[in-house]
Image: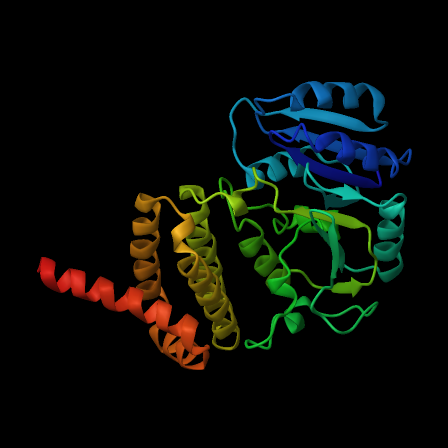
Amino acid sequence: MVKLSVIVPFYNVQQYAPDTLKSLRANTREDFEFILVDDCSTDGTPDILARAERELPGAVVVRHEQNGGLATARNTGIDKARGEYLTFLDGDDWLAPGYFPQLLAAIEELGCDFVRTDHVQCTGRARSIHRVPHGRRWTVMNPREAILPADRSTSVDYAYAWAGIYHRRLVDRGILHFTHGLRTAEDRPWIWKLHREAESFAAVGLLGVYYRRGVASSLTQIGDVRQLDFIRAFDQVIEETAADPEADKLLPKAVRTYCAIMAHHLGQIERFEPAVARKLRSMSAAALKRMPQDVLAEVMDSMDAQRAARLRRVRRRAVGTRTVAA
């Protein structure tokens, strides 16, 4: 019986994959499997993974014929997984030795649907600890209770799939899969669904994941059209939350988070290619129009002046464009 399935997507990370795989070797156990998903890499990554399949105990390599993005690669791994528990790692990150056995012991002790953990962010040589924004540790709770308050950072804002471990029953209930084809913000609809639909979770203070930030090939560093998938991702969050029995309570948090992310991208619009920048403005205006307007008005009134002004400018420009066109 496989106890833990570790799902690791790789795409053109030949510079970092050896460190990732070395850290997996320091986390092996006879009842662990490592599902290494090559998302149609075009560099030396496939050769590195072929060697890992021979040398890493429990390794299973799956190759995509077309690049599908992180969400799709993770789904491939979930479908292939045989473990009682599942977890994730990205192909350019790494682990502390012996971390996975500790993580597994934590969720078995707690007996909940999923566990969330802290992590170490690595930017060049700098290291900083990032903690789950949830004060109660080693305490099993209803995940819904960790969504609010709307005006503070909460567990749904800590949208890192690899910062935790998940029981297989979440797969069986259709909760753990990601939205197919999302190129960025794929963790956002996923974390919201997890907190709305799972029955129990806990946060623990384990540190073992080292998250490599600022990688040049990462989508978060590239100002191309794939970055605009955050709009599709948050549209899904709003739509699914609006259909929730507690929509009145939860929608202000969802709308506020959407607006904050949108304002962030608009504030860095110069890093986008000109055509993509224009598309960002028009898609943002359309997204603001789709949001529940009463909730949006309250959210914008409560936001800081700079971010609210960015969003209002986009709305006014869209209204003015329609007036001239008419």
Q: Is residue 313 above or below residue 6?
A: below
Q: Residue furthest front?
A: 125
Residue in the image at 45% along x and 81% along y: 302
Residue 33 at x, y percent in the picture: 80, 33
Quarter holding the C terminus is bottom left
The spot of residue 278 in percent (x, y) is: 29, 51
Quadrant of residue 18 in the image?
A: top right
Q: Residue at x 48, y 61 (%)?
A: 261
Depth check: give the residue in front, 12 or 239.
12
Residue 313 in percent (x, y) is at: 30, 68
Which of the image's four quarters has the N terminus?
A: top right
Residue at figure coordinates x 47%, y 66% from the top left: 260
Name the colour scheme.
rainbow
- Exactly how many numbered labels are in the figure? 0
> Can residue 114 be seen at all in this image of the molecule?
no
229 w.r.t. 46: above or below: below
Q: Position of residue 126 (x, y in %)?
A: 73, 53
**In the rendered view, does 315 fall on the left or right side of 184?**
left
In this rendering, is residue 113 above or below 139? above
Residue in view at x 81 percent, y 69 percent:
137
- Decide if residue 137 is in sight here: yes
Q: Is residue 131 left or right of residue 280?
A: right
* Closest to the observer, 145 or 25: 25
207 on left or right of 63: right
Residue farthest to the left?
Answer: 326
